[in-house]
Image: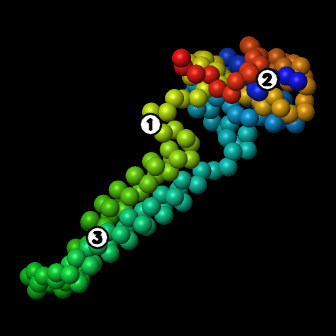
């Protein structure tokens, strides 16, 4: 049994990489992930990646922030210590709007950053995990899980036909920077 965990196809050109993705999908070979040094438009749709749900999280954090500060202000200025300023009502909603807005934005920003770090495992101080270090420089990498039923030679041949400059068989999941 082979100790290969991933088969990596390295490409110099993004169009050739997209062709490689197409050929692999035609032959029903599942793609683990694609690593590129720059954004490539349309690759999410081609790989079948769903839209992010961070927008829903942002809405929930914003709602939470607005509710929390509105409740604090209401309790402090209406129930705990009502003050008559210039004959105004103690529950003057227009006075609550600026700070409520600011706290909504603050909760949303911090909540989204925390949710993003949690969802992507990109915590500060964590060593980046990369399949091939050249993917951050000038290569486009298609990673294929080698545990599938397709023989490794067939996958290698498909990647070479699509224009892969190099095909590597990794026995480790990630390459470290050390």
Whether residue 14 is visible here, answered yes or no, is no
Q: Mark 3 points at which residue?
A: 97
Give percent across and percent down for residue 98.
26, 66
Left or right position of 52 against 24: left
Q: In which quarter of the image is the C terminus?
A: top right
Query: Between tags 3 and 1, which lies in front?
Result: 1
Residue 68: image quadrant is: bottom left
Residue 62: image x %, image y %?
42, 62
Residue at position x 85%, y 22% from top?
Answer: 2
* Separation (CA) of disc 2 from disc 1: 30 Å
On screen, residue 24 versus residue 116, left or right, reads right
The residue under the point 29% across, 73% down is 72
Q: Could one spot residue 118 in this view of the protein?
A: yes
Single out the mark in the foreground, 3 or 2.
Answer: 2
Relative vertical location of residue 160 with respect to residue 48 in this rendering, above or below: above
Which is nearer the N-term, disc 2 or disc 1? Answer: 2
Residue under pointer 1 = 124
Q: Where is residue 143 in the image (x, y as percent from the top left)?
A: 73, 28
Q: Mark 2 points at which residue?
A: 4
- How packed is label 1: few (under 14 Cα within 10 Å), some, or many (20 or more)? few
Q: Earlier in the sequence, mark 3 or mark 1?
A: 3
């Amino acid at each position: 049994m082979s100790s290969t965990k991933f088969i990596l196809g390295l490409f110099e050109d993004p169009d050739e990489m997209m062709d490689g993705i197409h050929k692999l999908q035609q032959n029903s070979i599942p793609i683990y992930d694609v690593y590129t040094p720059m954004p490539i438009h349309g690759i999410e749709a081609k790989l079948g990646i769903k839209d992010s749900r961070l927008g829903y999280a942002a809405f929930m954090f914003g709602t939470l922030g607005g509710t929390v500060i509105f409740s604090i202000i209401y309790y402090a200025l209406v129930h705990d210590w009502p003050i008559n300023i210039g004959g105004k009502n103690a529950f003057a909603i227009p006075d609550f709007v600026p700070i409520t807005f600011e706290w909504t934005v603050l909760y949303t920003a911090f909540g989204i950053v925390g949710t993003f770090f949690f969802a992507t495992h990109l915590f500060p101080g964590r060593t980046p995990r990369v399949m091939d270090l050249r993917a951050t420089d000038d290569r486009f990498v298609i990673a294929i899980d080698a545990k599938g039923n397709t023989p490794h030679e067939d996958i290698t041949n498909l990647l070479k036909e699509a224009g892969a400059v190099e095909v590597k068989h990794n026995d480790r999941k990630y390459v470290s920077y050390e």
